[in-house]
Image (tube, grey):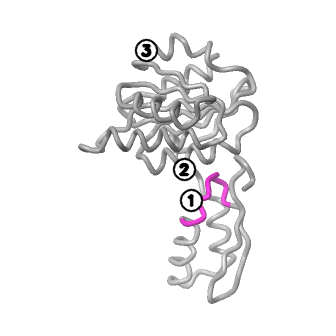
Amino acid sequence: SQGFRGISCRIHTPQGSFSALIPIPGRHMVYNALAGTAVGCTYGLTLEQIKQGIETLQSVSGRFHIIETGKYTVVDDCYNANPMSMKASLDVLQDGLGRKVAILGDMGELGTDEAALHEGVGVHAGQCRIDACICVGPLAAHIAEKASQTNPDLTVIREKDLESLLKNLNTYVKPGDTILVKASHFMKFENVVKALQEM
């Protein structure tokens, strides 16, 4: 892993092997690159063309978009969230510099298992090498509960809603922090990213 620069990997194909730096962080991006390589080989692209395609990948705004504000490194991942992507983002946060802070909000459209799925993210957060986990919303309260149980040393903060979080945000973060901001789109977490950029 190259930290937030991305992840480098070596890809082997029947036509030969090549190394590539995937410019979006996260081990799960390697699988996307492998899938892309397989498609490229099927359509007769050269390995050089495939490598170039992988290395010029752009992340969609709001999906693991890294913003250097001068004070903080903000990982803007507030476009969508499901339990798998939230765990993957927490994994990547561990590579950040300085204090590592996760600001997590409710995930929507998970059906009847929603409480248990949020709890699963909480267990994962408790197992990650992060410094603070700020959980916003009624469902994210389940994340907070399990994160605290899993790692009693982790700083876990609960906020009932976005408004309350924004009021207290400056007391939770310090210059030099790397801050992950992730929730389902309806939580309007782009306002958290905006507030951090203006602080």
Q: Is residue 21 magenta?
A: no
Q: Give the residue type at disc 3.
A: Glu
Tell me residue 172's x, y (percent): 61, 18
Which disc, if any, is residue 88? 2
Tag 3 near tag 2, CB within 8 Å: no
Q: Which residue is mark 3?
A: 163
Which disc, if any, is residue 124? none
Tag 3 near tag 1, CB within 8 Å: no
106 with respect to 3 (left or right): left
Q: Magenta part of the protein: which range?
A: 22-31
Tell me residue 163's x, y (percent): 43, 14
Q: Does dot 1 land on a helix, a strand or a loop?
A: helix
Tell me residue 90's x, y (percent): 57, 43
185 with respect to 78 (left or right): left
10 Å crowding of disc 2: few (<14), some (14-19), many (20+): some
Lower position in the chain sequence, tag 3 or tag 1: 1
Using the image as rendered, state which of residue 110 and residue 149 is in the foreground: 149
Lower position in the chain sequence, tag 3 or tag 2: 2
Tag in front: 3 or 2: 2
Q: Which residue is mark 1?
A: 28
Q: Give the residue type at disc 1.
A: His
For residue 8, what is the image quadrant?
bottom right
85 with respect to 195 (left or right): left
Q: Residue furthest left?
A: 112
Tag 2 near tag 1, CB within 8 Å: yes
Q: Residue furthest bottom?
A: 14
Q: Does dot 3 land on a helix, a strand or a loop?
A: helix
Q: Give the residue type at disc 2.
A: Ala
